[in-house]
Image (cartoon, helix red, strand yellow):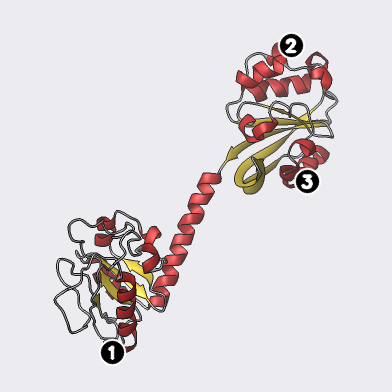
Amino acid sequence: MPAFLAGGGVMGAIMRAHDWSTTALGEPSTWPQSLRSAVSMCIAARSVGAIYWGPEFRLIYNDGYRPFLDGRHPWALGRTMAEISPTLWQALQEPAQAVLDTGEGFVAERQRLLMERGNGAEETFWYYSLAPIRGEAGTVEGIFLTALDTTEEVRAEQARNEGERRLATARDAAGLSADFRVLFEASPTPFLVVAPPDWTIVAVNDARLSLTGSTREEQIGRRLFDLFPDDPDDPDADGVRNLTASFERLSPCRCPTSWRSSATPFGTRTDASSSDGGARSTPPCSAHVARSRSSSTASRRSRSWCACAARPPPGTNSPGTSRP
């Protein structure tokens, strides 16, 4: 076997044992020097690397590229890209053909590419470059691909941007003043702010995040009762129903209220001795709804309402679980 195939990890061993006579590339001993040199560099590289050779873009690849072929490895060796990965090639064919025709390299950053994996196409994001490989006559005979998978980085950034957008939208919709937010964030008591009509969480202070062990991104923009539903294992749980009724009384009248419930999402228990049917909560939970005013305009009432996430009684789950 030619010396240029020495080393190269797993793919180097596979290429040395491969029956190249069954491919259009032929035996490695007949390959031009330009292809030999490119292959030697490709299989030695630790990054994702591949060669698209000739006008049909036949594939030779290294260990870094191998996992992205899924079940098509090692069948893909020496076959055309259009045959191996038709969905991926739809995105790569135009720039690859341009490199072959013009001899000018191409770079893409964070490009969305659909990779054939398992039973379908998976969305991925890549930084990759296509460099021309010139033959002995000086013409472009193939392309050297190097690539870096940036999918996790892009998705993390998308999640951060979505969280920031949701937070800004929620704060704007809630009409929270800057002064109110400063006081709210500084409070040592765990608080959150919800906005009608579906009681979406629009603000959470640090004390509550510390208590629940969660992040703002996990709470902001979520509906309160999606995040803190009744305990499905407790047939007597009626906290969501009663707390919703309390919020609905609070919203039109702008008056503080309390509620009576067998089990609210914040751990409140019914005062069983009460016979007046009134809405009130009893110890050990001090969860409550409080009216807030904008400090910038004394007469203006906030469109959102502050709910305290007090600690639950012994034996119940911590806030932030299915039954906080």
* Residue at horizontal 39 percent and vertical 58 percent from the top: 218
Q: Earlier in the sequence, mark 2 or mark 3?
A: 2
* Kind of residue at disc 2: Pro
Q: Earlier in the sequence, mark 3 or mark 1?
A: 3
Give me the C-alpha separation between circle 1 and circle 2.
86 Å
**For the C terminus, which image quadrant?**
bottom left
* Residue at horizontal 78 percent and vertical 46 percent from the top: 94
Q: Locate residue 177, reporting x and y percent.
A: 33, 77
Q: Nearer the viewer, residue 201 or 185?
A: 201
Q: Which residue is mark 1?
A: 299
Q: Locate residue 313, reporting x and y percent.
A: 18, 61
For residue 26, say whether it is visible: no
Q: Nearer the viewer, residue 160 or 101?
A: 160
* Residue at horizontal 64 percent and vertical 29 percent from the top: 66
Q: Secondary structure at mark 2?
A: loop
| Label 2: few (<14), some (14–19) or many (≥20) C-alpha neighbours in 10 Å | few
* Kind of residue at disc 3: Glu
**For the N terminus, which image quadrant?**
top right
Indicate left or right for 123 with 156 as reference. right
Give me the C-alpha separation between circle 3 and circle 1.
63 Å
